[in-house]
């Protein structure tokens, strides 16, 4: 399944059903804070960070297993994340999405948050959205905050910062 955006304007109930779709075949961008948090949980960045060149920028991406394109931290037996308490911001946002512009989806409207105009969506194909016996309720404000946090951190993530972080982790 691929992301099927549906406008997100009201709180929705959610419970991860471990369908594994979000942990396989996705390009997960990492911020320096993501890398540091995961390394702090005992994982070597060499084992989970890959690079992507986009224009004149080098981006850091969560590594995937070659045999199924699953995230290196995804446990295929249980469906659970081995770094859930330290997972990347993008993983904490999913199955939601934050955009600076509309996607052209019926019913979408801008969401004003902290003086910012955003468009929020959720993945209509995610079985955890409005699942029976939900674990939590997610609000548009929570997702907007995570989206803005990711944007700030992502903009400050560069090769010089990565080299500094590696030096810090080695000492």
Image (cartoon, rainbow, N blue to C red):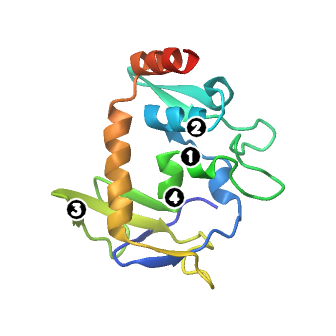
**Residue found at x 59% / y 70%:** 125
In terms of secondary structure, where does tag 2 sit?
helix
Q: Is residue 6 left or right of residue 127?
A: left
Q: Position of residue 169 (x, y in %)?
A: 54, 21
- The answer to whether residue 100 is above or below residue 153 is below
Which residue is tagged 3?
113
Which residue is tagged 2?
38
In terms of secondary structure, where does tag 4 sit?
loop
Which residue is tagged 4?
94
Give yes or no for contact between labels 2 and 1 (Cβ–Cβ under 8 Å): yes
Q: From where the camera sits, is residue 154 visible?
A: yes
Q: Position of residue 52 (x, y in %)?
A: 52, 27
Q: Nearer the viewer, residue 110 or 92?
A: 92
| Cα separation between marks 2 and 4 | 18 Å
Q: Nearer the viewer, mark 3 or mark 2?
A: 2
Q: Is residue 72 left or right of residue 33?
A: right
| Cα separation between marks 3 and 2 | 29 Å
N-terminal of the pair, mark 3 or mark 2, is 2
Rate crowding at label 4 as few (under 14), some (14 to 19) or many (20 or more) other CA atoms within 10 Å. Answer: some
Q: Position of residue 37 (x, y in %)?
A: 52, 38
| Cα separation between marks 2 and 1 | 5 Å
Give the quadrant of residue 118. bottom left
Rate crowding at label 3 as few (under 14), some (14 to 19) or many (20 or more) other CA atoms within 10 Å. Answer: few
Q: Nearer the viewer, mark 2 or mark 4?
A: 2
Give yes or no for contact between labels 3 and 4 (Cβ–Cβ under 8 Å): no
Rate crowding at label 2 as few (under 14), some (14 to 19) or many (20 or more) other CA atoms within 10 Å. Answer: many
Residue farthest to the bottom, as pictured: 132
Which residue is tagged 1?
86
N-terminal of the pair, mark 2 or mark 1, is 2
**Residue found at x 81% / y 39%:** 67
**Residue found at x 61% / y 26%:** 45
């Amino acid at each position: 399944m691929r992301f099927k955006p549906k406008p997100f304007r009201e709180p929705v109930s959610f419970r991860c059903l471990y369908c594994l779709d979000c942990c396989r075949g996705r390009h997960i961008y990492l911020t320096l804070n993501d890398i540091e948090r995961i390394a702090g949980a005992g994982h070597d960045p060499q084992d989970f960070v890959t690079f992507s060149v986009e224009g004149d920028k080098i981006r850091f991406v969560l590594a995937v297993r070659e045999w199924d394109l699953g995230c290196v931290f995804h446990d295929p037996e249980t469906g659970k994340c081995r770094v859930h308490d330290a997972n990347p911001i993008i993983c904490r946002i999913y199955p939601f999405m934050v955009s600076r512009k509309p996607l052209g989806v019926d019913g979408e409207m801008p969401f004003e948050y902290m003086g910012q105009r955003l468009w929020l969506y959720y993945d209509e194909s995610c079985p955890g959205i409005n699942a029976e016996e939900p674990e939590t309720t997610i609000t548009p404000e929570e997702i907007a905050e995570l989206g803005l946090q990711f944007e700030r951190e992502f903009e400050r993530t560069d090769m010089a910062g990565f080299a500094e972080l590696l030096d810090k982790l080695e000492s």
